């Protein structure tokens, strides 16, 4: 694990950013904002939640994206469920590629598709409350881990990485 003080300069704006994540919150927020008009979940509450994570994320793992249904292939029904799973060829984003001027992505992976979701305002609110509670829980765990690591100068503890 890198030293907590390791920083590099953002290739776009020149601000100091964490060398481990190599994520510039302000630059990436601008890239996300320039694409806001190109997508919608048809739920104002869900759109605002996704956009907030995109504006404030401090690393790629904290970003939510709305992915158009057409981006999925190999659609399969999940056994004993109303839901489906599908293959997302592009996969989740990793960061902004300044040379290509686009998001670099992790490559394909299987994802769970939730059906009958966006048209149901009640379900959208309930889903968002659950996601927010989980996010706060993991943030709390990360802060505890960070506190323990930063308070202990023993090198053996530096190699521990939280399961977030």
Image (cartoon, rainbow, N blue to C red):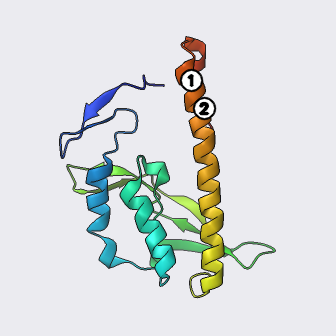
Q: Is residue 90 left or right of residue 146?
A: left
Q: Is residue 131 visible?
A: yes
Is residue 27 positioned above or below 68 on the image? above
Q: Residues within 10 Å of mark 1 (few under 14, many from 20)?
A: some
Quickly name the residue at label 1.
149
Residue 16 horizontal/vertical position (percent): 26, 35
Which residue lies at the image location 63% right of the left edge and 40% below the top edge? Answer: 141
Q: Residue furthest bottom?
A: 119
Q: Is residue 125 left or right of residue 25?
A: right
Query: Number of callouts in the render?
Result: 2
Where on the picture, by quarter, is residue 151? top right
Q: Is residue 71 left or right of residue 33?
A: right
Instruction: Find out whether the residues at labels 2 and 1 contact each other: C-beta distance under 8 Å.
Output: yes
Q: Nearer the viewer, residue 115 or 130?
A: 130
Q: Nearer the viewer, residue 79 or 3?
A: 3
Residue 26 horizontal/vertical position (percent): 28, 51
- Quadrant showing the C terminus: top right
Disc 1 is placed on an element classified as helix
Q: Residues within 10 Å of mark 2 (few under 14, many from 20)?
A: some
Residue 154 horizontal/vertical position (percent): 57, 11
Q: Residue furthest top?
A: 154
Q: Is residue 160 visible?
A: no
Numbered tag placed on residue 145 in the rendering: 2
Q: Nearer the viewer, residue 71 or 139?
A: 139
Which residue lies at the image location 46% right of the left edge and 67% below the top edge? Answer: 50
């Amino acid at each position: 694990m890198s030293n907590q003080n390791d920083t590099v300069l953002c290739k776009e704006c020149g601000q100091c950013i964490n060398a481990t994540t190599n994520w510039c919150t302000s630059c990436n927020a601008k890239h996300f904002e320039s694409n806001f008009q190109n997508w919608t979940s048809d739920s104002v509450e869900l759109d605002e939640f996704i956009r907030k994570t995109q504006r404030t994320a401090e690393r790629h793992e904290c970003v939510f994206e709305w992915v158009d249904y057409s981006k999925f292939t190999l659609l399969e029904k999940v056994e004993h469920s109303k839901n489906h799973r599908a293959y997302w060829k592009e996969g989740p984003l990793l960061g902004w590629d300044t040379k290509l001027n686009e998001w670099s992505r992790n490559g394909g992976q299987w994802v769970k598709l939730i059906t009958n979701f966006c048209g149901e305002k009640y379900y959208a609110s309930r889903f968002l409350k659950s996601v927010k509670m989980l996010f706060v829980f993991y943030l709390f765990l990360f802060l505890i881990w960070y506190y323990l690591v930063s308070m202990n100068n023993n090198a053996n503890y530096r190699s521990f990485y939280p399961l977030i």
